[in-house]
């Protein structure tokens, strides 16, 4: 037994510090996680019963050592690998990143980032993004896709990974999760909803060593129970409801207990309350104990060893066998792990005709096949891109948000003289892949070249990028437009006289600006990078028709350019994937009418609504192992909820986005499915199904509105429905309003349509901490519909 085992025993209670509750303002935050044992066993309930029976038959064939190998990762061709068992015709499991495509493989597509899917507000595109991605994973022999992302949710505007997921709004993210899980699994590939839970910043997401070689524990996200349910857990509940095969537990601590050994969040919330039937997989290297993690509900240790690359030493593996043999972990717990892993495998038919891992799927440049501990049968290199470029282009256009458009600057109408400016307009100069573990986290933050995806495990290996300049060149030559460009940002800082434009200024000037984000780091600020804000002002000083396009991971400080009268249009295109140039040309020239909407709020003052990251020189030099604490004292009041609660008008509201046409919303009507007041306030006790109490998902109200296209061109409108619960009843910290419905509807000029919204019990309830249940208010609920969070023209109140 090693000292590691001793540590395991000490941590068996699942907590790292004493059990005390502290007051933070009006919030009682947990400073410990209550122990919840034993880990609930899966039953296959909710439609997986047949697959569960097959998993049981499979399990019956395994020795203890084999069971342990089924739950402990090892080396191999994929980002994560479970060993094959030839005797049982089991070829092992191949796990691959990530949320924008099968990251490391060649001949695969790079899709728009999650934030673009969210900005499209288009359920069907969200689903199809994931479905096509899933076909690529399957084609390359990946059984498990390490996506979609609901954590980070986006508490911090500066969070380095927000773009991998959808939105700081849990409802919008919940829809993104549900559609992504369904799309991925419809392609026969297991979805891994990650990172569960509270992984809101990158700094100190993992433990570190200080200069005295002392271990400083990872940041603890301290989240109260109500905020947990109504905000951070909400989209994971959608993922479980949609049947996600796996949930990845996160690196950081939650209420002082590590994310992958937190019995409250894994055994209690996920498996008991939400009825999750799949398996909890650790993030890579997030396992810091053996017995404690196994008993707290972790089901698969990835990549298997303590470190990133080597399967030994491991807290699991042979140590887990020992723990079972000495009674520290019940063999039934390991059995449950295997059942949870194999049930979705059989459910998705992965035992039949599943392609072998494509040899290009391997991280061949980094991981040496000589270190693989097992023989893998690899398949040939296949091109899985198929016709996916079209969806990629359409989604990126649909997710492009038009924030400003004065003097009808857009769409362009075959301008005679056009200028393109900025270092984001052209080919990336540093290569096509932004995950270079040796080059560091800034590897993709090259100065010259367009930014089409972020960095870290959520990046993608491009087979091509269509840079904006290339697509604009093609269009300009068709139109007979004289095109000029200055791409070097240093040059753009000079007096425009030195740019040698003729004529000066061009009729239209388009500036492409970018902002880099990556796993492993948070943003230093919310600026457009490479001095772009100053350069745009310089350009606008000579060009009174300056159009700005941003390629960014999320919130930027746009106030200075929004206020500049010579900046006539602003488009937020985020990270659009490989077809970036084509998608933006479609929008710029009006081939596609913009219909994207912000999935977050942008303040007038850059600090409005921005929750600072936990970070300081003092913390970086601390000798207190528990110094890194993030108290989520704002509760649910992040993003537009913050602006609402303090009555601050933002620069651009949540849900905002212009079109080349105009829309009108009218005739809101809301009807009760059952007579008002007749449904019980708490959900009737029913056996838990994936997603929790099944009545949480039943419709209690139906709302309808009429939307009309009142302009001259066809376009898509997104009516958004917000619910306000009675504050007195729901209590302090209740958001003024929360998004609870949206739809995207395409309308010809003059056309109108009726749009319906189903409001579920969960949508109309608040989490009652005392009852540990979702409670419906008895008082009137306000329902409002409009075109964005600051423009809710229709509203009514109704008693549920
Ligand atoms: C990331 C995960 C990723 C895993 C495997 C981790 O560092 O946090 O999101 O899936 O690596 O690459």
Image: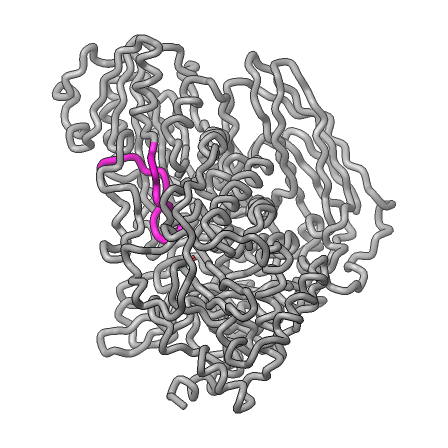
x and y percent of residue 521 in the render? 32, 55
Left or right of 214? Residue 272 is right
x and y percent of residue 349 in the render? 61, 55
In percent of the image, x 16 and y 33: which residue is there? 490
Q: Residue furthest front?
A: 87
In percent of the image, x 26 and y 27: which residue is there? 537
In percent of the image, x 37 and y 20: which residue is there? 568
- State the image quarter where residue 530 is shown: top left
x and y percent of residue 402 in the render? 45, 27
Query: Vertical placement of 717 versus 51: above or below?
Result: above
The image quadrant where one finds ligand 1 is bottom left
Q: Which quarter of the image is occupied by the N terminus? A: bottom left
Left or right of 99? Residue 487 is left
Model colouring: one colour
Q: 414 or 205, which is in the foreground?
A: 414
- State the image quarter where residue 741 is shown: top right
Q: Main secondary structure of the magenta part?
A: loop
Q: Residue furthest left?
A: 498
- State the image quarter where residue 737 is shown: top right
x and y percent of residue 313 in the render? 36, 78
Residue 284 in view (yes/no)? yes
In percent of the image, x 33 and y 27: which residue is there? 468
Left or right of 64? Residue 527 is left
Residue 197 in view (yes/no)? no
Tell me, yes or no, whether the highlighted magenta stretch contains residue 452: yes
Q: 389 or 17, which is in the foreground?
A: 389
Which region of the structure is painted magenta?
Answer: 447-465
Query: Vertical placement of 358 versus 274: above or below?
Result: above
Tell me, yes or no, whether the highlighted magenta stretch contains residue 724: no
């Amino acid at each position: 037994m090693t000292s590691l085992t001793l540590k395991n025993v000490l941590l068996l209670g699942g907590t790292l510090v004493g059990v005390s509750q502290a007051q933070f303002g009006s919030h009682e935050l947990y400073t410990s996680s209550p122990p919840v044992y034993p880990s609930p066993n899966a039953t296959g309930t909710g439609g997986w019963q047949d697959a569960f029976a097959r998993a049981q038959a499979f399990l019956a064939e395994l020795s203890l050592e084999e069971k342990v190998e089924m739950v402990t990762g090892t080396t191999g061709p994929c980002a994560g690998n479970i060993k094959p068992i030839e005797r049982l015709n089991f070829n092992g499991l191949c796990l691959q990143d990530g949320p924008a495509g099968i990251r490391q493989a060649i001949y695969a597509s790079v899709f728009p980032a999650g934030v673009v899917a969210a900005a499209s507000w288009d359920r069907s595109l969200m689903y199809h993004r994931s479905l096509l991605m899933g076909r690529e994973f399957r084609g390359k022999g990946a059984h498990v896709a390490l996506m979609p992302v609901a954590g980070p949710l986006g508490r911090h505007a500066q969070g380095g990974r927000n773009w991998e997921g959808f939105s700081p709004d849990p409802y919008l993210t919940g829809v993104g999760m549900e559609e992504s899980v369904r799309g991925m699994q419809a392609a026969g590939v297991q979805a891994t909803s990650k990172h569960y839970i509270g992984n809101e910043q990158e700094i100190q997401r993992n433990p570190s060593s200080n200069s005295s070689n002392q271990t400083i524990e990872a940041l603890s996200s301290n989240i109260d129970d109500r905020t947990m349910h109504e905000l951070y857990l909400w989209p994971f509940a959608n993922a479980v409801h949609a049947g996600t095969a796996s949930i990845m537990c996160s690196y950081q601590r939650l209420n002082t207990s590590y994310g992958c050994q937190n019995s409250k969040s894994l055994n209690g919330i996920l498996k008991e309350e939400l009825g999750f039937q799949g398996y909890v997989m650790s993030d890579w290297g997030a396992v810091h104990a053996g017995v404690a993690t196994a008993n707290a509900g972790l089901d698969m240790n990835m990549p298997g060893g303590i470190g990133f690359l080597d399967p030994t030493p491991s807290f699991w593996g042979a140590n887990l066998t020992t723990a079972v043999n000495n009674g520290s972990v019940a063999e039934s717990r390991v059995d449950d792990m295997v059942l949870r892993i194999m049930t979705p495998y059989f459910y998705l038919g992965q035992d039949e005709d599943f392609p072998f891992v494509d040899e290009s799927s391997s991280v061949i440049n980094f991981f040496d096949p000589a270190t693989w501990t097992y023989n893998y049968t690899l398949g040939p290199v296949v091109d899985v891109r198929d016709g996916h470029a079209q969806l990629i282009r359409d989604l990126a256009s649909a997710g492009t948000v038009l924030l400003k458009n004065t003097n009808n600057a857009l769409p362009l109408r075959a301008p005679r003289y056009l200028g393109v400016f900025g270092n984001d307009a052209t080919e990336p100069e540093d290569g096509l892949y932004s995950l270079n573990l040796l080059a560091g986290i800034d590897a993709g933050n090259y100065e010259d070249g367009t930014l089409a995806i972020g960095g870290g495990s959520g990046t993608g290996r491009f087979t091509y990028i269509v840079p904006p300049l290339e697509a604009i060149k093609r269009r300009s030559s068709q139109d007979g437009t004289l095109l000029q460009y200055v791409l070097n940002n240093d040059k753009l800082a000079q007096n425009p006289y030195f740019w040698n434009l003729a004529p000066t200024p061009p009729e239209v000037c388009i500036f492409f600006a970018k902002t880099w984000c990556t796993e492993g780091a948070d943003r230093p600020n919310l600026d457009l990078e490479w001095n772009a804000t100053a350069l745009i002002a310089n350009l606008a000083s000579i060009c009174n028709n300056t159009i700005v396009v941003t390629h960014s991971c999320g919130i930027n400080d746009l106030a200075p350019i929004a206020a500049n009268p010579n900046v006539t249009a602003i488009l937020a295109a985020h990270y659009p994937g490989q077809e970036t140039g084509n998608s933006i040309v479609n929008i710029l020239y009006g081939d596609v009418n913009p219909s994207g909407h912000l999935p977050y709020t942008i303040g007038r003052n850059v600090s409005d609504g921005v929750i600072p990251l936990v970070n300081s020189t003092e913390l970086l030099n601390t000798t207190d192992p528990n110094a890194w604490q993030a108290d989520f004292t704002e509760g649910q009041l992040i993003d537009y909820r913050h602006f609402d609660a303090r009555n601050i008008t933002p620069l651009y509201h949540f849900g905002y986005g212009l079109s080349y046409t105009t829309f009108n919303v009218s005739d809101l009507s809301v009807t009760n499915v059952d007579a008002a007041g007749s449904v019980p306030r708490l959900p009737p006790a029913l056996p838990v199904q994936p997603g929790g109490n099944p009545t949480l998902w039943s419709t209690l109200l139906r709302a309808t509105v009429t939307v009309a296209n009142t302009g001259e061109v066809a376009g898509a409108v997104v009516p958004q429905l917000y619910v306000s619960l009675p504050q007195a009843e729901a209590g302090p910290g209740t958001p003024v309003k929360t998004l609870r419905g949206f739809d995207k509807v395409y309308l010809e000029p003059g056309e109108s349509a009726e749009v319906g919204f189903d409001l579920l019990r969960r949508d109309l309830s608040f989490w009652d901490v005392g009852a540990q249940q979702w409670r419906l208010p008895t008082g009137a609920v306000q329902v409002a519909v409009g075109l964005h969070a600051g423009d809710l023209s229709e509203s009514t109140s109704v008693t549920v």
